[in-house]
Amino acid sequence: MATGCYPRLWHSSPKKPEQLAKEALGLCQAAGYPVRRPMHKPQDPIEFPEAQELAEGHAIKLLYPDPEGGPPRELLLSRVDGKIYAMDSECPHEGGRMAEGPLMDGRTVHCPLHLYRFEPGSGKAVQVDCPPVKTFEVEQRDGHTWVWVYGRSS
Ligand code: FES
């Protein structure tokens, strides 16, 4: 299972952002974390083949390239009632990282830091006053799963 591998000193490093991004990408790949890329153009959705193996009521964290050249970003895919949902893995409460593995009650994503729960589809917090998690549009077709991580341009 892929998990995050961000360099923690990102903001205090004297190195240029492009150099740090390159190093972060190298570290992630060397550690065996696959970083998925858009098919053709930078704004294309990204296919995540791992979604096909995702069990009902479970979540997995995956990486994708930052469009501004920063370190790879982390995404959480979850499956509820057979449908795949995608959200940013960063918790809007105090910046914790959403948990991989079984969902709470098989239906809600949770942050292990203070155990806030979020709805996978809407990103809304459950029974607590907290801003929603950023969610992404998902397209499932012919056994493939694409996520519009950079938004859908019309
Ligand atoms: S940081 Fe996620 S619940 Fe507090």
Image (spheres, rainbow, N blue to C red):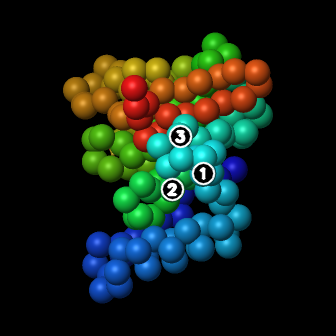
The number of numbered discs placed on residues in the rendered structure image is 3
Question: Which percent across, then down, holds residue 91?
Answer: 36, 42
Q: Residue at x 53, y 40 (%)?
A: 44
Instruction: Give the residue number, with chain letter if any, for mark 3.
Output: 44
Question: Which percent across, then down, holds residue 74?
Answer: 49, 50
Residue lying at the far bottom in this picture: please name it: 14
Front one among 97 and 12: 12
Instruction: Give the residue number, with chain letter if any, for mark 1.
Output: 37
The 10 Å Cα crowd at callout 2, few under 14, some 14 to 19, many 20 or more, is many
Q: What element carries label 3?
A: loop
Do the residues under discs 3 and 1 have CB atoms within 8 angstroms?
A: no
The residue type indicated by label 1 comes to: Arg
Question: Which percent across, then down, holds residue 77?
Answer: 57, 35
Quadrant of the image containing the C terminus = top left
Q: What element carries label 1?
A: loop
Disc on res. 65: 2
Q: Where is ligand 1, by quadrant?
A: top left
26 sits left or right of 122 in the view: right
Q: Which residue is drawn at 32% across and 50% down?
A: 95
The residue type indicated by label 2 comes to: Pro
Compared to residue 16, the image places residue 141 above or below, namely: above
Q: Residue at x 65, y 39 (%)?
A: 47
Q: Is mark 2 on a helix, strand or loop?
A: loop
The 10 Å Cα crowd at callout 3, few under 14, some 14 to 19, many 20 or more, is some
CA separation in Å, label 1 and label 2? 7 Å
Do the residues under discs 1 and 2 have CB atoms within 8 angstroms?
A: yes
For the question of whether residue 88 can be seen, the reply is: no
Ligand 1 within 8 Å, label 1 CB: no
For the question of whether residue 21 can be seen, the reply is: yes
